[in-house]
Image (tube, rainbow, N blue to C red):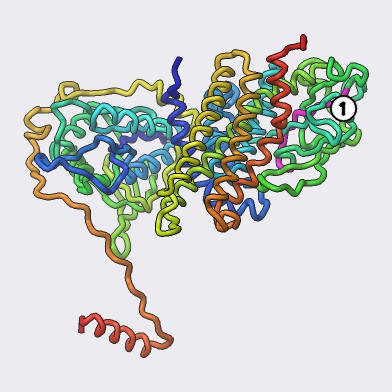
Amino acid sequence: MNFNLTKEQETVRKMVRKFATNEVEPIAADIDKEHRFPTETVEKMARYGLMGIPYPEEYEGAGGDHVAYAITVEELSRACASTGVICSAHTSLCTWPIFAWGNEEQKKKYVPDLASGRKLGAFGLTEPNAGTDSAGQQTIAVDAGDHYVLNGAKVFITNGGYADTFVVMAMTDKAKGNRGGITAFIVEKGFKGFSIGKTEDKLGICASSTTELIFQDCIVPKENVLGKVGDGFKVAMTTLDGGRIGIASQALGIAQGAFDVTVDYMKQRKQFGKKLSQFQALQFEMAAMKAEIEAARLLIYRAANFKDLHQEYSEASAIAKLVAGETAMKVTTKCVQFHGGYGYTKDYPVERMMRDAKITEIYEGTSEVQKIVIAGKIFGKDK
Amino acid sequence: MAYKIIVCAKQVPNTNEIKTNPETGTLIRDGVESILNHDDANALEEALKVKDAYPGTTITVITMGPPQAVEMLQECLAMGADDAVLLSDRALGGSDTWATSNAITAGIKKLGDFDFIFAGRQAIDGDTAQVGPQIAEKLGIPQVTYVQDFQIDGNEITVQRALEDGYELIKVKTPCLLTAIKELNTPRYMYIKGIYHAVKHDIKVWGAADIGVDLETVGLKASPTNVFKSFTPKPKGAGQKVAGDTEKDLAINLICSLKEKNII
């Protein structure tokens, strides 16, 4: 057993930390306030390979690994959680299913543009009446000879307003539901009948784009069926297994970011003639938070490492996301508390971090859904 | 046209609070994070821009230092350099600028032909700004220091050489040596792909024997410089701005302020 990062992974952290300090952190408060998608940052991330870390160079990825990818999302999110999720949704939810489930033609057509960051990706599963309960899908795909016709709508789609390529789930056989009734499709921005609907106005991650996707007699060529017809549920679930590593990393980054600025604040802020850092009660709280952050970090790197080793990572990523999401919420809430009234203002970044943290307990499977996944591994089908 | 560029770089402690060994006057490196010297990053960036503009251009980074300097060379490779050489040998330890430039000049000669050499103006640890110019002298090539703007056309390089109150416009023919200042450019980051290649890259490590340098000209004993005293310069206090609506007011306020301080 070896808990050390590789030289490559350590250097990736060093690079992304520097990148985030120079390019991400200085604009984080502004883009949050303006609800502005940081297109210019995404272009820079693409230039340096941050938009395709775990994909081979053959497909114009950076040729890295999933631990390095987790570190990247963590370090970006430490400065700005919106920037972190742009990278995560793109890498884990769009590029990955095409890379893992696509045939060679699809991979050659779509992965290089995505892994190089020339194009941005998104993933469409959630609907008003079907998120995790994917059998409730109302988006229908009808076989029309050489193409499918999609009708319906998706909601809460991360990167929706800025993505070029979408992996979309639709019902091809209602009667079969999750067991062979759902099919995954690769949809391009310009496909006839496809449009972007409402942009959500959110509590946090305000600089990320969260939109509806609308399909009105949308024509999708048959060669854009991802996996086999009826494999959609498996495509979606395996995609989310990996996506959870990304969101757990985002949560970890938020927690670490809030923790770090709070340590600095405590060393400066004086009350009752002492620095906050000199009060033992507060020191102990910080120590406990550090322990929880470290525990989350190890769980995330373990899940990412399982993925790199092609071992089962479904349960590990659910555990990592459950712990990291709850840690992010807990740590940021306490960090606001330690800042007192200042922490409640937009003059200090912990206010934004606390708002950003909440989503990590919700998207890509709520904490409750993670418990369903974990409980499923404990009790299996023979409850 | 493709160029063959050599970049001289140094791994330095990431701090201005340099500690020195009081007996030898040399730097204590233990426990301090090490980084690529800032001006050297500017030198490398300019070379990389030439490489971007002229495909086929190759960049070799050369440094002298302890074995851990490999990390700095890996950073240079991850930014886009093609090859890297570390001169590392007990016999080279403790070299002053004269001895260092002897070793690096020998290393460059071993590397063979080049179009130009780019070095940083100076390292943040020693602040001498001597090694680059000494290398140029020892190689017998022209040099331009404090480069703040760089253009290349064939074998002719046009640079702006920064002065305190302006710049000189200088044309120089290759082969030559230039030293970069931070105004020249903004260094790029490492590429993720580059990191994975850099760690696997076989960085050449050459000792004194490999570069065929005369042992009487390198190392601590061969260094004519004795460090008399080293200190951290005290930062200058912030200046004071004299306010006033008219020129007359400004003059009066200035005189009052100088009188208050008993300067006049």
Give the quarter of the figure containing the C terminus of chain B.
bottom left
Q: Is residue B35 above or below residue A323?
A: below
Q: Nearer the viewer, residue A120 or A230?
A: A230
B255 relative to B188 in the view: left or right: left
The residue to which callout 1 is attached is A136
Q: Amino acid at mark 1?
A: Gly
A65 relative to B184 in the view: left or right: right
Mark 1 belongs to chain: A
Residue B53 at least partly seen: no
- Residue reaching furthest top? A382
Identified at 34% across, 45% down, the residue is: B38
Residue A208: image location, x then y, percent = 67, 44
Q: Dot 1: what SS?
A: helix
Residue B63: image location, x then y, percent = 26, 33
Q: Which residues are magenta?
A: A161-171
Residue B50 at least partly seen: yes
Please tell me whether residue A235 belongs to the stretch shown in magenta.
no
Q: Residues within 10 Å of mark 1 (few under 14, many from 20)?
A: some
Please tell me whether residue A162 belongs to the stretch shown in magenta.
yes
Residue B176: image location, x then y, percent = 27, 42
Identified at 61% across, 49% down, the residue is: A352
Residue A185: image location, x then y, percent = 79, 25
Identified at 56% across, 41% down, the residue is: A331
Give the quarter of the figure containing the N terminus of chain B.
top left
The image quarter in which residue B164 lies: bottom left
The image quarter in which residue A304 lies: top right
Instruction: Identify the main secondary structure in magenta.
Output: strand
